[in-house]
Image (spheres, helix red, strand yellow):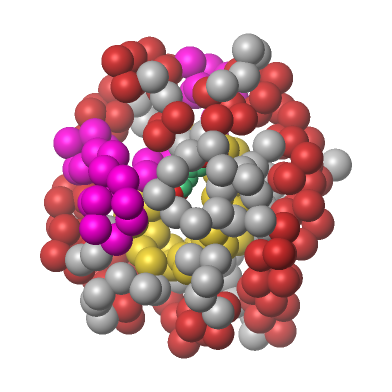
Amino acid sequence: MANFEEIIISPSLLAADFGHVADDTTRVINAGADWIHLDVMDGNFVDNISFGPAMIEAVHATNDIFLDVHLMISRPDHYLPRFIEAGADLITVHVESNHDVADTLKRIRKAGVRAGITLNPATDISEVEPYLEMIDLLLVMTVVPGFGGQSFMAEMMPKVEQAARWRNERRLDYHIEVDGGIGPETAKIAAAAGANVFVAGSAIFGAPDMRAAVEAIRSARS
Ligand code: DX5
Ligand code: ZN
């Protein structure tokens, strides 16, 4: 069983300085990051292009931290083997992407990688319900995916609450992650709703003191 009481901080590398990705990764690990969140965008599923498997492989080659890969791409099924090969520890796919969701989740787990599912703000939480037994993590997007630095959508909290209710009622086993506009204050709101994994880009990489920023988010549930 995963420990849902444990707070996990997953800084998003999208907010790092792309000219110094290795340095920024080391800095954020030294600042207390538990995981590294890697936002993969294909310019089709979302209106932005970030990076692909080569970035995951480069981060994997330089340290041992848990790699939390968020695929914002139209065909996660097609590209899956490359992200597995690159060293992802967890791969989260969108329910809205063009794939057989159950099959993709099965393939992720079969490769010994943890499987996550996520949904856009406009998508109803019921869309992910058929997959709850096949996942290690449910990511509730708290912004429209595509760009860092957007404002947290508190109106997504009923989804977090529903995800926690299902987990409890059905004795299921998945982390609940939130992504978008997370900082110390919004993390508190999400933690109260039931989230335990916090993705943060600008609030960590944009902070003058990275360690203080990580700790401020970690204290969300104290
Ligand atoms: C949004 C990405 C997020 C983003 C978060 O499409 O999935 O992970 O990097 O950035 P902040 O924390 O700046 O909202
Ligand atoms: Zn993300």
Viewer-closest of 205 and 5: 205
Quadrant housing residue 186: top right
Q: Residue at x 42, y 76 (%)?
A: 134
Viewer-closest of 31 and 6: 31
Q: Is residue 79 magenta?
A: no
x, y percent for residue 77: 20, 68
The magenta region covers: 27-56
Quadrant housing residue 86: top left
Viewer-closest of 189 and 69: 189
Viewer-closest of 13 and 62: 13
Q: Residue at x 54, y 66 (%)?
A: 121
x, y percent for residue 177: 58, 55
x, y percent for residue 106: 30, 75
Q: Is residue 212 visible from the viewing direction of this image?
A: yes
Q: Residue 8 vs residue 117: left or right? A: right
Q: Residue 155 vs residue 8: left or right? A: right
Q: What residue occupies the far front of the structure in this picture?
A: 47
Residue 155 versus residue 36 in the image, above or below: below
Q: Is residue 66 visible from the viewing direction of this image?
A: no
